[in-house]
């Protein structure tokens, strides 16, 4: 059983007990539950539920494992013969989630 869920403008294929990194979510604290209701596709056994755009009544329940920061991405800009160079770094904030269960409607 798996589902394709959308959050932060990105899509993730998740199954039970998966750990995923998503765009930063505003959460009260680590250890709280998060309900992701933008389920695009859900597969359970031989039945496949495809949303238009979302599957009605489907949700993915996740446990928050806290906020993290991803590896630094470096952008180095250089113009030859101009003695011009610039080094810029950026670290994106993310939320770590562990999938507890998939809620898929019957029928």
Image (cartoon, grey):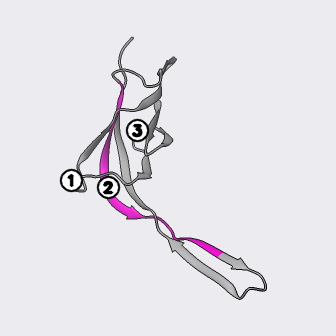
What's the distance in space between the residues labelled 2 and 3, CA to CA? 15 Å
Give the residue at mark 1: 28
Residue pictured at 52% horizontal, 17% vertical: 46
Magenta region: 58-76
Give the residue at mark 3: 16
Disc 2 and disc 3 in contact, CB within 8 angstroms: no
Closer mark to the observer between disc 2 and disc 1: 1
- Image x and y of residue 54, in percent: 43, 25
Among the two numbered marks 2 and 1 on one chain, the one whose residue lies closer to the N terminus: 1
Q: Is residue 100 above or below residue 27?
A: above
Q: How crowded is mark 2: few (under 14 residues within 10 Å), some or many (20 or more)?
A: some
Q: How crowded is mark 3: few (under 14 residues within 10 Å), some or many (20 or more)?
A: some
In the rendered image, residue 70 lying in the magenta stretch gets the answer: yes
Q: Which residue lies furthest to the bottom in this view?
A: 83
In the rendered image, residue 60 lying in the magenta stretch gets the answer: yes
Give the residue at mark 2: 65
């Amino acid at each position: 059983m798996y589902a394709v869920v959308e959050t932060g403008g990105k899509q993730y294929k998740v199954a039970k007990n998966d750990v995923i990194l998503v765009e930063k979510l505003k959460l009260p604290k680590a250890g709280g539950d998060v309900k992701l209701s933008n389920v695009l596709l859900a597969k359970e056994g031989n039945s496949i539920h495809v949303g238009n755009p979302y599957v009605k009544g489907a949700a993915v329940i996740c446990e928050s494992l806290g906020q993290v920061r991803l590896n630094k991405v470096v952008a180095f800009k250089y113009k030859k013969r101009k003695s011009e160079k610039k080094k810029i770094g950026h670290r994106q904030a993310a939320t770590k989630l562990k999938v507890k269960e998939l809620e898929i409607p019957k029928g």
